[in-house]
């Protein structure tokens, strides 16, 4: 029976509720979906018209060509009228919970410091198996009802999750978390279904790790868009899954990222505790590079606290670990950290010390930041914007106001092209330093421009 008219009317909803179709949609096997539509009398021409594809593309897919690109899958789902959630591409119940803003968090009335303590307790329990910071460790982690799982999964399904995570992480680096967060969360909506499917033990362990990393990315992009409760929720679930996947290196990465959240919130004490837990996991993983990254971030926390002796000591250890590291054997997440990133961290730590301890630290910060800025490629636009902001602060502290203002404008120019709340918040110290020098017209113009960009107020 032909369920569509020649005018291309929508496909009846009952078509999507047949079990064979539901399974194909859950696995995103578009070739199977198209073949099932053909059984229901939908022609190749009609499929092409609804999805915006050419008939030759539809023919190739019917012959078995895989469709993995998120935007193509979304276009197909919308064009065919697939109910939301059946392919894990849009806002079903699970996705809606994860995409929800901070106001929809499980405990919005709790003070941020309480939430940090709960995460620390959870992180300690997962990492070292003990309630080091208290017993209430995980009530803030939500576990919404999952959509029906595919019956059985194999390694190919897990590789799809890994490939999507890599592609989405590249978008985050280049354009900011706002460019891809919804897509990351939608991938999770689909990926989480796999936990209810049957598989071999090897596939299941790798699935734990793949989903942990996807939650890790969801936490990072949530952080970058200012959704702190969502970030904490995703990082908490990422830790649990990484532990089940027995991947200490990924646990170190998750804790490193959560520590960065706390640094951003100006809670260096809590950040330091998280970094130290991450360092334990990094040491257990056997990676000098991962240990070095955690040490560098511990140095940043100490610098924020105004402890230059400890900051410089940890920065020295980070250098030592980096020099000994075998990058080829390092965990995948740590391989980003090269000499450019080390220079960036050295410049960042010394910029912090120049603000909290003594302006003399600008002498080390400026050349380190210059090296990083000159070597970060377009794919690391956000990192480059952070370093330009720090460089401008250093020049203002040195009294080179005109040059500092020039670099500050470059930082704003670059940041305006990014979908990142974090770049705006990282500019607050620059605005404050420029405001202190409002008698200089260049500094005044910079302070006002940063204020307009970030939505804050400059001094009158």
Image: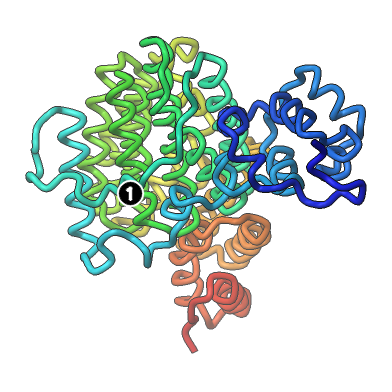
Is 418 on the left or on the right of 451, as rendered?
Answer: right
Crowding at dot 1, Cα within 10 Å, few <14 / some 14-19 / many 20+, comes out as: many
Instruction: Tell me residue 123's x, y (percent).
Output: 22, 38
Instruction: Tell me residue 196's x, y (percent).
Output: 39, 28
**Residue at left offset 68%, top offset 57%:** 417
Residue 323 shows in the view? no
- The image shows residue 416, relative to residue 434, as above or below, that is above
Instruction: Tell me residue 25's x, y (percent).
Output: 61, 33
Snapshot quadrant of residue 205: top left
Of residues 455 and 83, the one drawn nearer to the viewer in this rendering:
83
Residue at image mark 1: 232
The structure's colour scheme is rainbow
Q: Tally the numbered discs.
A: 1
Q: Secondary structure at mark 1?
A: helix
Of residues 390 and 265, the one drawn nearer to the viewer in this rendering:
265
Is 260 on the left or on the right of 399, as rendered?
Answer: left
């Amino acid at each position: 029976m032909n369920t569509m008219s020649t005018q291309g009317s929508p496909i009846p909803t009952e078509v999507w509720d047949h079990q064979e179709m539901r399974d194909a949609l859950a696995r995103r096997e578009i070739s199977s979906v198209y073949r099932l539509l053909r059984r229901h009398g939908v022609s190749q021409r009609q499929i092409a018209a609804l999805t915006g594809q050419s008939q030759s593309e539809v023919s190739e897919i019917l012959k078995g060509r895989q469709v993995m690109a998120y935007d193509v899958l979304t276009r197909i789902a919308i064009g065919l009228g697939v109910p939301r959630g059946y392919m894990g591409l849009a806002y079903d119940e699970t996705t809606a919970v994860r995409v929800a803003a901070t106001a929809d968090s499980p405990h919005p009335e709790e003070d941020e410091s309480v939430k940090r303590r709960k995460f620390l307790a959870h992180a300690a329990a997962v990492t070292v198996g003990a309630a080091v910071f208290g017993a209430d460790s995980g009530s803030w982690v939500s576990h919404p009802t999952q959509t029906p799982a595919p019956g059985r999964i194999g390694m190919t399904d897990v590789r799809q999750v890994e490939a999507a995570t890599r592609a989405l992480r590249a978008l985050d680096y280049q354009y900011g978390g706002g460019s891809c967060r919804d897509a990351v969360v939608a991938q999770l909506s689909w990926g989480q279904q796999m936990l209810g499917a049957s598989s071999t033990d090897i596939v299941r362990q790798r699935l734990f790790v793949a989903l942990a990393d996807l939650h890790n990315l969801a936490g990072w992009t949530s952080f970058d868009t200012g959704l702190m409760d969502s970030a904490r929720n995703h990082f908490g679930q990422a830790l649990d899954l990484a532990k089940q996947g027995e991947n200490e290196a990924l646990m170190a990465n998750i804790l490193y990222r959560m520590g960065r959240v706390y640094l951003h919130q100006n809670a260096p004490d809590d950040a330091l505790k998280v970094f130290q837990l991450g360092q334990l996991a990094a040491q257990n993983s056997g990676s000098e590079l991962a240990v070095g990254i955690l040490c560098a971030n511990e140095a940043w926390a100490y610098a924020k606290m105004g402890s230059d002796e400890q900051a410089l000591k940890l920065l020295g250890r980070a250098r030592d670990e980096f020099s000994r590291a075998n990058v080829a054997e390092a965990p995948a997440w740590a391989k980003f950290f090269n000499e450019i990133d080390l220079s960036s961290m050295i410049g960042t730590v010394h910029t912090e010390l120049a603000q909290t301890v003594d302006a003399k630290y600008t002498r080390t910060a400026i050349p380190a930041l210059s090296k990083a800025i000159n070597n970060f490629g377009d794919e690391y636009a956000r990192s480059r914007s952070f370093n330009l902001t720090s460089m401008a602060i250093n020049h203002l502290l040195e009294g080179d106001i005109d040059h500092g203002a020039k670099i500050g404008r470059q930082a704003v120019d670059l940041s305006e092209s990014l979908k990142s709340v974090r770049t705006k918040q990282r500019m607050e110290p620059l605005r404050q330093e420029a405001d202190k020098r409002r008698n200089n017209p260049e500094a005044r113009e910079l302070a006002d421009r940063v204020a307009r960009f970030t939505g804050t107020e400059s001094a009158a």
